[in-house]
Image (cartoon, helix red, strand yellow):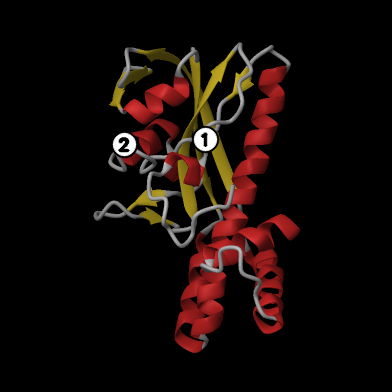
């Protein structure tokens, strides 16, 4: 609970500043409600991977151009495509509060984002444990939209995971994920263990972002 509260505070834009008692109590209350309504689901598939130079990779016949992703995956020969969602009820819950209690809706957005991040971390930990039994190690998650990994790749990634059928995750005509509290990512796997060098804020060049994770 402590880590996700810390992340929610970051998403709310407080940075390293302490929140007041009232805000902290509201965050705690929102997390209790969120725990009652979330319906977290995830899916992953493993593909062979080819890193074809400094800016191109191939995943099961799908060619992706991205220098940042190629760097992240250097030395990997397999890749995990991953998708996760907190479910449609979380969207409805936030929408209801946006009509009746805007402060709670804002905190709800932040708490749901932190909840999703923690859930993805837990999922990746379980996948990593399976890989370690095979003498393989995972790289950090890398999502469409990080660095120069185009957000447009989300559509192909979701199709390869069959997200609509497996976890109920779809894209709108405008390219938005539904449910909104969802994520897709790729995770490289190799026989060499390396320190995590790119994850979320660390992949972004916007150093002055209000929501940037502290190092």
Q: Is residue 169 left or right of residue 58?
A: right
Q: Which residue lies most toward the left here? A: 173
Residue 39 makes an appearance in the image = no
Residue matched to label 1: 141
Nearer-the-camera pick, 195 or 160 = 195
Residue under the image location 60 percent in, 66 percent down: 9
Q: Secondary structure at mark 1?
A: loop
Give the distance between the C-alpha atoms of the residues marked 1 and 2, in whole angstroms.
Answer: 15 Å
4 vs 76: above or below? below
Question: Of the residues under marks 1 and 2, which one precedes in the sequence?
Answer: 1
**Camera-nearest residue between 187 and 20:** 20
Residue wearing tag 2: 148
Disc ID at residue 152: none
Q: Nearer the viewer, residue 25 or 184?
A: 25
Query: Quadrant where the N terminus lies?
Result: bottom right
**Residue 148, picture quadrant:** top left
Q: Is residue 72 above or below residue 181?
A: above
Percent across and percent down for residue 27 are 66, 73
Left or right of residue 140: residue 28: right
What is the x, y in percent for residue 131? 66, 20
Q: Residue furthest bottom?
A: 100
Residue visible at 75% across and 59% down? 2
* Residue located at (70% from left, 55% from top): 3
- Would you say residue 15 is visible in this rendering? yes
Task: Tell whether label 2 touches label 1 (CB within 8 Å).
Answer: no
The percent coordinates of residue 125 (x first, y second) are 68, 34
Q: Secondary structure at mark 2?
A: loop
- At horizontal 67% and vertical 58% (from top left) the residue drawn is 4
């Amino acid at each position: 609970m402590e880590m996700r509260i810390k992340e929610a505070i970051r998403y709310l834009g407080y940075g390293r500043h302490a929140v007041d008692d009232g805000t902290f109590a509201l965050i705690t209350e929102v997390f209790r409600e969120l725990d009652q309504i979330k319906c977290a689901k995830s899916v992953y598939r493993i593909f062979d991977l080819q890193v074809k130079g400094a800016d191109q990779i191939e995943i099961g016949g799908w060619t992706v151009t991205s220098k940042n992703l190629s760097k992240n995956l250097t030395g990997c020969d397999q890749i995990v495509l991953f998708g996760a969602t907190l479910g449609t009820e979380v969207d409805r819950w936030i929408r209801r509060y946006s009509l009746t209690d805007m402060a709670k809706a804002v905190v709800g957005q932040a708490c749901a984002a932190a909840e999703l991040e923690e859930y993805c971390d837990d999922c990746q930990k379980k996948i990593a444990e399976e890989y370690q039994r095979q003498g393989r190690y995972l790289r950090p998650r890398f999502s469409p939209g990080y660095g120069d990994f185009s957000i447009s790749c989300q559509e192909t990634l979701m199709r390869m995971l069959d997200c609509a059928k497996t976890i109920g995750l779809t894209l709108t005509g405008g390219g938005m994920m539904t449910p909104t509290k969802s994520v897709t990512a790729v995770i490289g796997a190799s026989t060499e263990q390396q320190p995590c060098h790119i994850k979320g804020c660390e992949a972004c060049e916007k150093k002055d972002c209000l929501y940037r994770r502290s190092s």
